[in-house]
Every structure is written in C-alpha cells, then in structure tokens.
Image: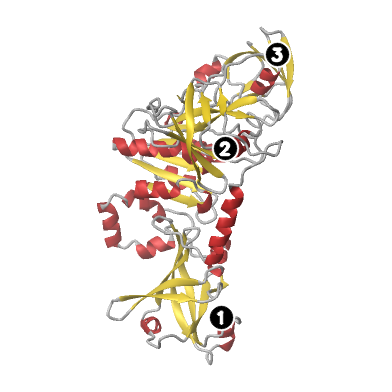
Amino acid sequence: MPRAFAEIAFTPSVKAAQTRYGSRDGNRGFELAEDPRNVLQDAEIAFIEARDSFYQATVAENGWPYVQHRGGPAGFLRVLDERTIGYADFRGNAQYLSVGNLNADPRISLILMDYPNRRRLKLWGRARIVHENEDPGLVARLEVASYRARVERGVVISIEAIEWNCPQHITPRLSEAEVDALIAAVLGEHRPQPTDAGHSTPSVELGSGPLAVRITGIRQLTPRIRAYELRDPADRPLPAIAAGAHLRVPVQLPDGRTSTRHYSICSDPARRDAYEIAVLLKDDGSGGSEFIHRSYALGATLHCEMPRNDFALRNDQDPVVLIAGGIGITAIAPMAFALRASGRRFQLHYAGRSLREMAYLDALQRELGHAINVYPSDVRPLDLNEIVSGAPANARFYVCGPQRLLAGLMDRAGALGIPPDRVHVERFAIPEPVGTGVAQPLEVELRRSGVTLTVRADQSILDAVEQAGVPVQSNCRVGNCGSCVVKVLEGEPVHADNTLTERERSQGRFCPCVSRASSQRLVLDL
C-alpha cells in the first residue's frame, strides 16, 4: 500500500525526474509502505493546533497555481476530526482568488511551518466553502472568540494525505518571546559552576596519556550535547585517523578517582589540524559526562590515549547504509564524510528524539543533501524494516545508537537473510541489563589469582574484577574492541559483545565488560 501523498504527488513525470536525478530507489519505499498516512494522529493534531499561520495552494481554471498565506491566533486552524480540518475565513482584500479557485477545483495543499524547531507538515485535501446561513453550527466551531475580525465563510478540508517534510533549508525564525527564552537558557547554561570551595573551576591539565591536546573551542550543539575542539598545543598535525576512530579522554569521577571515557572523533577524518568530540550530558551516568560539561574549559590541556578504531569502514566498494540514533551520529557522520570523499554510494539515516536534540543536523544537511534522511521521532519515526528491505542486496550496514536500535537492526537483518558480517554496530553503553538480560548475581572465580568474588546483578564482571584488585586490560568497556578478552574455564557464558567471532566464542573467549553467564558460577583464566 503506497503512502497517500505518493499516490497523489508521484506522477509519471515526477518519477521520471527522480530517475534522472538518482533518487528513484530512495523514494520507492514511499510506494511500499504499510501506513498510507491519511489520518491525523496525536502528533499532527498537536502541531496543527499550535500554528498561527500556514500557506495554502489552489489552482485556477487556467492552470495557474496560487499560494496564499493565512494567519490568525494560534489554533485558528481547527481539527474537526481525524480526517477533517477547517478555518474561519476572514475578510481580506476582497479579491477572492483562493475562494474562486476552490469553487472550480476543490483540491488544496497546505504547508504548516514551525520555524524555531525547523519542522514542516504538508497536507493534501479537498476543500468546501461553508457559509453561515448554510451551516451556522459548523461555522461557529471555526470561529475564534479572541479574534474580532469579521468571518465571511468557513473553509472545511477533507484530508487525503499527510507528510512530514525534512528540515533541510528551513531557516529558524523566532518570535520575541522565543528569543528571550533562548537567551535566558543560554545564560543559565554557561554560568560558571562552583567547586566545593565556592570558586570557579580553574583550567587544569588532566590525564597521563601520551597524546596531549588543548581545548580550543566549545560549542553547545543541543541543550544536552556539547562539542569540544581539540588541537595540538604546539599546533602540530594530530595523528592521522580513519572514520570510526575514538579518543579516550581523562575524567574525574564523583568518588575522586581518575578515569577515562571514550568518545568518537566526529570531525571529518581528513582533518589533521583538530579533532572534535561531542559529549552528551547523562543524568543517570557514572559522572564522566557531568565532569566534562562542568570542568572542561578553553585552554585546558588533556593527556589522552592515542586514537583507536574498532568501527572502521571495510575497504571495498559495496554500497553503504549508515544508521545513527541520537548521539550515535558522532560515530556515523565521519563515515559519511569519508564515503563522500571516496565516491562510494551511501545513504545516511539519522534518528533523534526531536530536531532540537539532533546534533550536527544543519551541517550534515548542507554537506550531504539528498544522501541524508532525517527521522525526528516526534514527527517521523525511523522504520528499520523500510530501510533494510529497501537497501541494495550487497549493502553494508553501519549503525550506532541506543541498544534498541542496534537490536532492532540485527533482528530485521536476520529476518531478511542479510549475513551478520554485513552488519556492523558500535555501542556507546553496556546493554541493559548488564550483559544480555541475565541480570542476576553471579559467582566468578579467578583461577590464576586465587580470588572468588560475587558480581552484583547491576555490575559488569570487568568492574567487579577490577574492584577486587586484579588487573585486566580493557579499552571501550562496551564490547566493541576485544581488549578485555579472557578465557572461560568453567560455566555457561552468554555473550553480548560485538567483536568475537562464533569460532572464538566456541574456543572459550569471553568479554567480561558486557557478557554474562546463564550458569550461577563462572571460572575465568585470570
């Protein structure tokens, strides 16, 4: 079943244009969708009722289109039911162009704009003119009590198709009240944070790694994501990297311990003058992101580990499907830059909670054009089935984001017979619950160390081993890199990593950072 808007808008000449300009395959999914999208849902109703203007298009008998702006108090465009909207038509310049057009041809198209959040809703329908003497009750439903302009008639529109449009090329425009609110929020966000002694946090040197970088720029990308530009203190070129690389940076945890956290290098990998990382502030995290947001300041020097890459693009010419969820765009965006530079065929699908919370969106849309597809979940949820089933047969998939996105992609790929070695995932967090859902206390014996310990249900085996004072090499701590691999001597492991092959797992290799056990006891060669 095609989307209703595609049935209306994808005429033979439109399809021919899509073919000529290379977007036919990408648009074909609209003709194979399960939901026709011709019924107003909660998201559309809320959006319509919040608008104070819209644009409408009609067509004259001579074939010329006419676009008119309609305005009024917020909510003057009324939702009458899930398939019907309407508005009171106030007296204007008395030319009656739209009214006359609708009397001859009831087809109408509306575009509703939310400029601050760069959202756009398109509606197709058939309109009818209703005068008060014909249906006074209906006209009364369209009136706006607080708006004293004269109502001449009502315009009632039967919805035939709905489509949310991408935010590309929408310039944000703010009312005076919206500007005041944003300024207040920014001032609050950037006030100096006091330390325990009541003083502003000083710029300091942090960490003990071999790579020194200085913070030379800080940008607030979204309300909760902040970007940090890092350069060599002596302005020398930084180590060369490839797309997918990450950097381990120093942090201080709330208990006073010094630790590290790894973040994808999200700038163009071709750059050698600077790296950029973007940090999402996590309210329920261990304190690393909160320390960075509070304490990383311009001029501070960080002594980091050398860049490492556990999520590199394969060196082939296969078409690529990139999928990013939320902060996962920081790992995926450099891949888009690298693929574009190499001339390889790719599509980027970027999902987030809302446009306001999607980091780097403006820049990516400017740089990538039609190669990027945007899915703010409050407007247009990402459809993995549509993406995977519509991909080329020899495509490779690279995905980074929340665990539900990774699991959903693996499920869809498996159901469609896509080989696992063509699906590449990058985690930013341990799956919840720890390991693979085997969330129960576990007894672990470290055979060579002569130590037996109990691992809590909410604790990783790696954390418990380190707290017991037994050193274990590790890096990513989310199952991507394989640095912490150990051998299982006894017990039934349940694997949750992204790095070990089935053969390696059958040989007893095990990642204690994320994996668990179905048995109540596990013996490791440590």
Residue under the image location 61 percent in, 16 percent down: 472
Residue found farthest to the left: 20
- Mark number displayed over residue 142: 1
- Mark number displayed over residue 216: none
Say if residue 157 shows up in the picture.
yes
Q: Quadrant of residue 344?
A: top left
Q: CA distance from mark 2 to mark 3?
A: 29 Å
Residue 185 at x, y = what percent? 59, 54
Mark found first going from the N terminus, 3 or 1: 1
* SS for callout 1: helix
* SS for callout 2: helix
Q: Quarter holding the C terminus?
A: top right
Amino acid type of the residue that numbered disc 1 sits on in the rendered structure: Leu
Give the residue number, with chain letter if any, for mark 3. Answer: 445
Residue under the image location 56 percent in, 69 percent down: 49
Say if residue 344 shows up in the picture.
no
Q: Quarter holding the N terminus?
A: bottom left
Tell me if 200 is positioned left or right of 162 in this view.
Answer: right
Q: Determine crowd level at label 1: few under 14, some 14-19, many 20+ residues with C-alpha closer than 10 A.
A: many
Residue 132 at x, y = what percent? 53, 90
Give the residue number, with chain letter if any, for mark 2. Answer: 403
Residue under the image location 73 percent in, 13 percent down: 452
Amino acid type of the residue that numbered disc 3 sits on in the rendered structure: Glu
Q: Quadrant of residue 520?
A: top right
User: Which one is nearer the viewer's eye here, 392 or 102?
Assistant: 102
Above or below, 100 against 123 in this view is below
